[in-house]
Image (cartoon, rainbow, N blue to C red):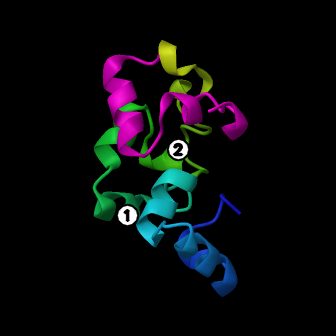
């Protein structure tokens, strides 16, 4: 479910998200970190600079480009990110624990 944008969720799922105190923007940032957005939508939201600091290019983001795959930053721990990269990750709603895929039960 976290893979989907808020507007892609079923109505009952959206209601559940709203009941938890999240709105659509919060869901798209904290739950799927904008992965279902097109690059043009990324620009509209104003986070392209953060993604670029993390090594993303438009062709990587939209897949099928000559860059292929994702940036190297995807494969490192939070501690291995530079301070600038950590700030950029924070702009797309990552924290150290979410970046490192720490189970919520351990937060």
Query: For the residues marked 2 and 1, what is the alpha-carbon distance in whole angstroms?
Result: 13 Å
Q: Residue furthest top?
A: 80
Residue shown at the point (57%, 54%) measured from the top left: 31
Query: Could you say which is closer to the camera, residue 86 or residue 74?
Result: 86
Q: Rate crowding at label 1 as few (under 14), some (14 to 19) or many (20 or more) other CA atoms within 10 Å.
A: few
Residue shown at the point (48%, 66%) measured from the top left: 22
The quarter of the image holding the C terminus is top right
83 left or right of 78 in image: left
Kindly check if marks 2 and 1 are in contact, taking CB atoms under 8 A apart as contact.
no
Q: Earlier in the sequence, mark 2 or mark 1?
A: 1
| Residue 88: image location, x then y, percent | 35, 35
Residue range corresponding to the magenta coloring: 81-107
Query: Could you say which is closer to the camera, residue 43 or residue 87?
Result: 87
Query: Could you say which is closer to the camera, residue 63 or residue 91?
Result: 91
Mark number, residue 31: none
3 relative to 59, above or below: below
Q: How many marks?
A: 2
**Residue that numbered label 1 is attached to:** 40
Mark number, residue 60: 2
Query: Could you say which is closer to the camera, residue 42 or residue 97?
Result: 97
Is residue 31 visible in the rendered image? The answer is yes
Q: Quadrant location of residue 10?
A: bottom right
38 relative to 105, above or below: below
8 left or right of 55 in image: right
């Amino acid at each position: 479910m976290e893979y989907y944008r808020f507007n892609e969720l079923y109505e009952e799922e959206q209601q559940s998200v709203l009941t938890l105190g999240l709105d659509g923007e919060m869901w798209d940032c904290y739950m799927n970190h904008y992965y279902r957005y097109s690059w043009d939508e990324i620009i509209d939201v104003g986070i392209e600079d953060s993604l670029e600091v993390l090594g993303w290019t438009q062709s990587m983001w939209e897949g099928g480009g000559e860059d292929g795959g994702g940036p190297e930053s995807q494969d490192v721990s939070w501690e291995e990110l530079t301070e600038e990269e950590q700030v950029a990750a924070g702009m797309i709603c990552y924290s150290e624990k979410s970046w490192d895929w720490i189970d919520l039960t351990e937060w």
